[in-house]
Amino acid sequence: MTIALSQIMKPSTAQAFRGLVTILNKAKVEAEKTGASEQAYLSARLFPDMSDMKWQVQMITEFAIRGTARMTGVPAEKLPELAKEEDTFDALIARIGECAAIVEAADDAVIDGNADMQISMPVGPEQTMELDGQTYVMSFYIPNLFFHVTTAYNLLRAQGVPVGKRDFMGM
């Protein structure tokens, strides 16, 4: 049995986004219940030099559409960039929905046909990473996707939001 890249990339992204929406909705309810400001949750950090909760959501959604664009052959100079303007749970949830729709609409055959495509991308100051499409999806895209969703989960959990594994899994 062969599994196509689109069968890995798209369902994994959809699941990660479902989990992200679930935990954001729970955080919104918790903020309303306790009278805490949404900003208290959205500006939470695990450590001072780490990005905040809001950025985690903004980053992973942009990462997902840029990764999808890469896998559909969009040249590096034409990759989409999203403004990072959302400052409420509702706005972040809407952003996730818009990005999820973009990923879902990507042509499976094009993604699958780009398994051997060479991808060159910046990974830091004056550093680039060279990967083929399959390695990009399996060893860069999927781990990054779940890293930032996990970080968002941990940020909310650390703030006392009652989320668990089933919420993270989007169940």
Image (tube, rainbow, N blue to C red):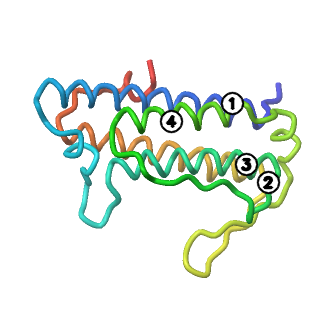
Query: How far is disc 4 from disc 3 in space, using C-alphas?
Result: 16 Å
Around disc 3, counting alpha carbons within 10 Å, would you say few (fewer than 14), some (14 to 19), or many (20 or more)? many
Q: Say left or right for 12 vs 70.
A: left
SS state under label 4: helix
Upstream in the sequence, badge 4 or badge 1? Answer: 4
Q: List the residue tagged with mark 4.
A: 96
Query: Which corner quadrant of the image does residue 26 belong to?
Result: top left
SS state under label 1: helix
Around disc 4, counting alpha carbons within 10 Å, would you say few (fewer than 14), some (14 to 19), or many (20 or more)? many
Upstream in the sequence, badge 1 or badge 3? Answer: 3
Around disc 1, counting alpha carbons within 10 Å, would you say few (fewer than 14), some (14 to 19), or many (20 or more)? some
Query: Which corner quadrant of the image does residue 77 belong to?
Result: bottom right
At label 1, the amino acid type is Glu
Q: List the residue tagged with mark 2.
A: 74
For image coordinates 60% across by 56% down, the residue present is: 81
Q: List the residue tagged with mark 1.
A: 104
At label 2, the amino acid type is Val
Q: Position of residue 67 (x, y in %)?
A: 67, 49
Around disc 2, counting alpha carbons within 10 Å, would you say few (fewer than 14), some (14 to 19), or many (20 or more)? some
Badge count: 4
Query: How far is disc 1 from disc 3 in space, using C-alphas?
Result: 12 Å
Query: How far is disc 1 from disc 2 in space, using C-alphas?
Result: 16 Å
Q: For the residues labelled 4 and 3, say whether their Cβ atoms are less than 8 Å apart.
A: no
Q: List the residue tagged with mark 3.
A: 69
Residue that sits furthest to the bottom in the current view: 126
For image coordinates 27% across by 39% down, the residue present is: 156
For image coordinates 53% across by 44% down, the residue present is: 61
At label 4, the amino acid type is Ile
Q: Is residue 14 above or below residue 154?
A: above
Q: Position of residue 129 (x, y in %)?
A: 68, 68
At label 3, the amino acid type is Ala
Query: How far is disc 2 from disc 3 in space, using C-alphas?
Result: 5 Å
